[in-house]
Image (cartoon, coloured by chain):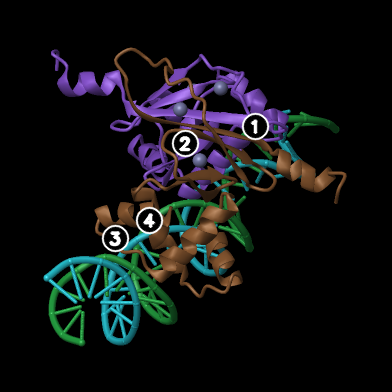
Chain colours: A brown, B purple, C green, D cyan
Amino acid sequence: MITNIRSLLHEQNYRLTQERKALLGLFSHANKARTPIQLHQAALGAGVGIGLTTVYRMLEVLTKIGLVSPFLLDGAVYYTYCTHSHHHHFICLDCHRVNDLFDCQQELSTPDGCVVEYHKLDLFGTCATFTRERFGEFN
Amino acid sequence: MITNIRSLLHEQNYRLTQERKALLGLFSHANKARTPIQLHQAALGAGVGIGLTTVYRMLEVLTKIGLVSPFLLDGAVYYTYCTHSHHHHFICLDCHRVNDLFDCQQELSTPDGCVVEYHKLDLFGTCATFTRERFGEFN
DNA sequence: TTCTTATTGAAAATCATTTTCAATAATGGA
DNA sequence: TCCATTATTGAAAATGATTTTCAATAAGAA
Ligand SMILES: [Zn+2]
Ligand SMILES: [Zn+2]
Ligand SMILES: [Zn+2]
Ligand SMILES: [Zn+2]
């Protein structure tokens, strides 16, 4: 997995630094949408002393190679991390967990003469995990 | 149309001011996605002396009553204006024109136990109008 | 190991957005 | 129509997010 990322980075002449490894580890394990500042705090919390500037730069790089993508929620920019190509997300408004959705009507109808480059489909709501945490019988 | 908006505003105790009328006029006629700053400049360009702060406040109000919605493009926040309820957009990456899309698979499949509050579907590409402007035989 | 160059972090700079506050204008009622 | 109430406005200041700068460091190639 890290090997894939290394080569993805390498293709664009990016290096896989300690900071990037640490940040990728954090980001990819939590499967939650995060703001740059939340990511930075998560890093510090996990004992990874990394600069906020570096987090921003990292997100820029990851966006460029397509491992991450930003969206707006409540006026803030959140990033989702994922390694799959075309798919969509269900994002929990309560806990910000991200669930992948793999089915997609590729044949979205468009106005005549329009050429679609890409599309984004995001569903927002409350996820099962959050509901379980909150109201589950085993807590 | 303005009557509708007046009552929408009125329901939430908002007033229909000169500035809001002017801005709504500009926004609703251009059918282009715009950033707050672009809207402000468009207003100034059209001879409407309005403060940038007011544009921001207006967008907040319009978002609240659902006439406008923000999305991210190239790291900037753009707003689309529209008066219809549930539908989606085709946004031109070149000229930023917005086309409404009225068909939507409401039955989007979701992970078990997840409850969808709302969803967003945006298609990005090049629109017919832009292509015509650019390469059309009658220019 | 050594060289080259991408990357880092702290601080400063910039850009976007929000807050403050006194002046003004929109609505509702007399 | 006039008045009173209160939402709205705009300029400036404050805040917050993101980017730039630059010298020091570390990654990758040879
Ligand atoms: Zn995903
Ligand atoms: Zn799709
Ligand atoms: Zn629309
Ligand atoms: Zn829909």
- Residue A3 shows which numbered tag? 4
Q: Residue at x 40, y 60 (%)?
A: A58
Residue extending furthest toward the right:
A137
Q: Amino acid at mark 3?
A: Tyr
- Residue A14 shows which numbered tag? 3
Say whether residue B17 is left or right of residue A69.
right
Say whether residue A65 is left or right of residue B81.
left
Residue A73 at x, y percent in the picture: 57, 44
Q: Looking at the picture, do discs 2 and 3 lie on one chain?
A: no
Q: Amino acid at mark 4?
A: Thr
Marks counted in the figure total: 4
Label 2 or label 4, whichever lies nearer to me, is: 4
Q: Secondary structure at mark 4?
A: helix
Please say if A93 is above or below C19: above
Please say if C20 is above or below A99: below
Q: Chain of mark 2?
A: B
Q: Amino acid at mark 1?
A: Pro
Question: Which residue, given by chain and number where applicable, does mark 2 sit on?
Answer: B79
Q: Secondary structure at mark 2?
A: strand
Relative depth, front residue between A51 and A12? A12
